[in-house]
Image: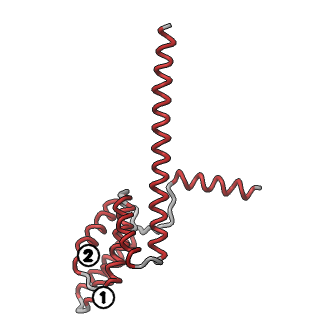
Amino acid sequence: MDAKISSFFDSVGSFFSGGDQIPLSDHDIILGCEREVAKAAEGDSDELKNESIMRLSWALVHSKRSEDVQRGIAMLEASLANISSPLQQREKIYLLAVGYYRSGEYSRSRQLVEQCLEVAPDWRQALVLKKTIEDRIAKDGVIGIGITATAVGLVAGGIAAALSRKN
């Protein structure tokens, strides 16, 4: 019984905290990736440059800081036109979807993750992200309905109180 109660409170806490399963990166990871990109830029290997830029993009869109997320989105969008490999395109579109999710643009994120799933319908990461997005949209809808119902109740209560004072 205690396990059921604990599970219930964990799920309620997760609902209100917005907990999702998408990993986060911190500023130290981003700094490390930036150093890696600078070092790769000095070399001759385009493949090494591209890989280090992908790691930096990953770190940026998984950041807690909105400025980093926006920077990651901008980097990915700028590099999207220069892709020849379908696998690399899928990866960048997925990272864009994560970035848009992190920035609160859930509809854009859902569009991008669905593009990923058109290319690879069984891709587990994209399926998890899609479910996370849909859960977040549903949660935001429930919270919005709750706020609206509360506001309507307060207005109705205010009107009822005003009418009772008149009589």
**How many angstroms separate mark 2 from mark 1 (CA)?**
17 Å
**For the point 49% across and 10% down, which residue is it?**
165
Disc 1 crowd rating (10 Å Cα; few below 14, some 14-19, many 20+) is some
Q: Nearer the viewer, mark 2 or mark 1?
A: 2
**For the point 25% across and 89% down, which residue is it?**
46
Q: Earlier in the sequence, mark 2 or mark 1?
A: 1
Give the percent coordinates (x, y) of residue 72.
31, 69
Q: How is the image coloured?
A: secondary structure
Nearer the observer, 105 or 36:
105
| Residue type (three-letter) at the residue carrying disc 1 | Leu
Residue at the right extreme of this rendering? 1
- Residue tagged 1: 48
Give the percent coordinates (x, y) of residue 51.
33, 84
The answer to which quarter of the image holds residue 1 is bottom right
Q: Is residue 27 visible?
A: no
Helix, strand or loop at mark 2: helix
Helix, strand or loop at mark 1: helix
**For the point 48% across and 14% down, which residue is it?**
163
- Residue tagged 2: 80
Would residue 10 be found to the left or right of residue 87 on screen?
right
Counting every numbered tag in the picture gives 2
